[in-house]
Amino acid sequence: MATRIGTTRSICPECLRQLPAVDVVHDDGTVWMERTCPDHGFFEAYRWPNAEHYQAFRSLALPANPPARSFPMHAPCPFSCGICNHHARRPTQVGIEITQRCNLNCPVCFMASHEDDNELATEEFRGIFQTIRSFAGADVGVNLTGGEPTVRPDLASIVRIGREAGIRYIEISTNGLAIARNEAYLRELADAGISGVYLQFDGTTPEPYLATRGADLLQAKLSAIETCRRCGVQVVLAMTVVGGVNENQIGDVVRFALANNDIVVGVALQPAFTSGRFEVRRSVPLTMGDVIFALDAQTDGLIRVDDLVPLGCSHPLCDAGTYLARRNDEFIPVTRGLTHEEYRAWYDPNSPQGAVLWDIAAKRVPDFEGGLSLIIMDYMDRSNVDLERMEQCSMFHATADGRLIPFCSSELNDAQGNRIHPSLGRREAR
């Protein structure tokens, strides 16, 4: 028997109609979202492994810093993105999907990359960077993504345009193959002004890559990290966590990052969601809550459940993290023992995404010598959209027509696999 614990708004996974939804607790303590479409019937979506932790976590919202600009809402959420005037939080990170092409065909890819015959010309990105700055300021983090951004021969030129527009932090989201093969290429990107590399990294053994990427890419990943080390370009490891595939390697990836903390400055754990291309069988969908408990179980006391806190820049169910401050060869979670009242007092709503906890580390462990940012991002697809979360998103995608669209909305597709918002270079949905 299910017990109702809350309400929200969602959509029908078939027709995408906005629907009222309820959160319920099942007899096993897990949390699910339920809603019923008058045309397509009843749907439920798994939300969290532990109801007590779920209710405590979602209560930890921090003050919202609204967008600098917005436009009137012209259609029901999520069809009025741009940013609409119902949106509660400012962008702290913006992705620019500079290509749909890729040099891999991964079984798991939220971008669903394919051949792209309608890429934007190099100079067209100048206006996009200027739009980002006008909405979010110069301190926003910009991620150049795809597809695989390194397939564009003008990638360094695009980076330079972004820097000329005043954007301070430009990261490249990549599978690392081009970097692994060509040190001179990475040096060119570094000279152009990239702030770091966001590297797909799904495990420390070959098996996860065979499942998620269709090839054994481990050595290429290690080579890419070594190239970054030689070039002095910092790395964030981005792990797509798939139930039954690699969720038992979460602790191993964290330990690998700590062992390479001279160049690896962060780990981003992303429970897999099914927008785009998803062809991998998984035993169970995973949520941010599952990853939090896995970190506790797999890191031998280094990271505990209560060390993970909402980042504050989004809805508390959207992302969580901690910062492992390094001092005298020891790593200390700066959130350990931190009360929510202390967190609210020290929280700076103007911190860029990912820097919130670094700022607290600087205050709480004043003699720290660097460390590792650990972030979990719980993306949504049409099966589990929570529109109250969507309206507080701080991660956006930029479009060619001058809009910024919340990430989970920009990747949302209908039952036929078509995006409801066109990709960057396309004026019509494919």
Image: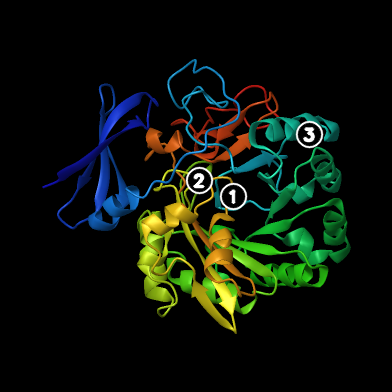
Disc 2 marks which amino acid? Cys
Q: Nearer the viewer, residue 352 or 378?
A: 352
Disc 1 secondary structure class: loop
Q: From this viewpoint, is residue 42 visible?
A: no
Q: Is residue 278 left or right of residue 235?
A: left
Q: Is residue 324 above or below residue 53?
A: below
Disc 3 secondary structure class: helix
Q: Nearer the viewer, residue 184 or 386?
A: 386
Q: Residue 61, image x and y in percent?
A: 39, 46
Q: Is residue 394 above or below residue 16?
A: below
The residue identified by callout 2 is: 313
Disc 3 marks which amino acid? Phe
Disc 1 marks which amino acid? Ser
Residue positioned 41% across, 80% down in the render: 300
Single out the mark in the foreground, 3 or 2. 2
Q: Residue 69, image x and y in percent?
A: 60, 26
The residue identified by callout 3 is: 125
Q: Residue 317, image x and y in percent?
A: 39, 48
